[in-house]
């Protein structure tokens, strides 16, 4: 893919309010589910491995996304384990992921995962259709094992090199999110670079993780 990216505002506008609100609310709702789960059976949550809890959260986000978006025009779902994807027309392919506060995600580096984060053309490119791969999910606090607000990010090349990441609006649980940029770079590659922060980042070569993290 050429180093020319749509801005966050362009992507959000093109996705449309129903899709953006649905994604944000699905993720916010999964955060409410985690709080309910932790309150009801805290020892179950405490016993989860990092991978196991990420998978549980992913299941809740996915179930809520289907409930909120399955009747929205131009939205389709692919669920072929271990891959789950949401398509908006043929323009966007979306995967749901946990993000670090610097925007890094983690996934077992399968050929499919690497192709996704590298923006490699898929079969639709044979029909001269360009699909942008974007990631939605939440910021994760490792210390408290808690979910932050819903986010959307774009990357091209690696799991932790982020072109931009923005917050998603949400309505689940009565919350009101924002879409202010969290760590943007200019769409043409100019302007402020993503800040370099000396914090631990996910190792993409040695995780136990799967698509669900």
Image (cartoon, rainbow, N blue to C red):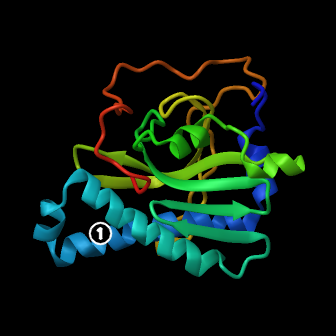
**Residue 26 seen anywhere in this rendered image of the structure:** yes
Q: Picture coordinates of residue 37 (x, y %)?
A: 25, 74
Residue 47 vs residue 79, the one in the foreground: 79
Q: Indicate the secondary structure of the residue bearing disc 1.
A: helix
**Residue lying farthest right?**
128
The tally of labels here is 1
169 w.r.t. 99: above or below: below
Q: Residue at x 31, y 68 (%)?
A: 34
Q: Left of 66 or right of it: where is 33? A: left
Q: Left of 155 or right of it: where is 91? A: right
129 w.r.t. 35: above or below: above
Q: Residue at x 89, y 46 (%)?
A: 128
136 w.r.t. 102: above or below: below
**Residue 129 seen anywhere in this rendered image of the structure:** no
Q: Picture coordinates of residue 146 (x, y %)?
A: 30, 54
The N terminus - image quarter: top right
Q: For label 1, count other residues whose C-alpha is less than 10 Å away and answer few (under 14), some (14-19) or many (20+).
A: some
Q: Residue at x 44, y 53 (%)?
A: 211
Kindly identify which residue carries mark 1: 35
Q: Residue at x 56, y 23 (%)?
A: 194
Residue 124 vs residue 91, the one in the foreground: 124
Q: Picture coordinates of residue 73 (x, y %)?
A: 79, 75
Query: In the rendered image, which quarter is residue 32 located in?
Result: bottom left
Q: Picture coordinates of residue 149 (x, y %)?
A: 47, 54
Q: Left of 77 or right of it: where is 211? A: left
Q: Left of 74 or right of it: where is 49? A: left
């Amino acid at each position: 893919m050429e180093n020319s990216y749509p801005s966050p505002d362009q992507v959000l506008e093109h996705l449309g309010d129903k899709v953006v609100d649905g994604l944000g609310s699905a993720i916010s709702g999964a955060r409410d589910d985690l709080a309910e789960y932790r309150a009801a059976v805290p020892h179950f949550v405490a016993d989860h491995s990092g991978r196991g809890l990420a998978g549980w959260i992913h299941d809740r986000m996915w179930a809520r996304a289907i409930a909120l978006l399955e009747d929205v025009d131009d939205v389709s779902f692919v669920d072929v384990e271990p891959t789950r994807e949401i398509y908006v027309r043929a323009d966007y392919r979306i995967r749901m992921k946990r993000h670090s506060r610097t925007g890094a995600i983690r996934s077992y580096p399968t050929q499919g995962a690497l192709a996704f984060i590298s923006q490699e053309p898929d079969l639709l490119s044979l029909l001269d259709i360009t699909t942008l791969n974007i990631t939605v999910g939440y910021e994760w606090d490792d210390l408290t094992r808690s979910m932050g607000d819903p986010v959307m990010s774009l990357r091209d090349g690696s799991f932790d090199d982020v072109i931009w990441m923005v917050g998603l609006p949400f309505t689940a649980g009565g919350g009101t999110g924002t879409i202010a940029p969290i760590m943007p770079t200019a769409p043409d590659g100019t302007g402020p670079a993503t800040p370099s922060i000396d914090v631990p980042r996910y190792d993409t070569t040695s995780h136990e993780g799967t698509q669900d993290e």
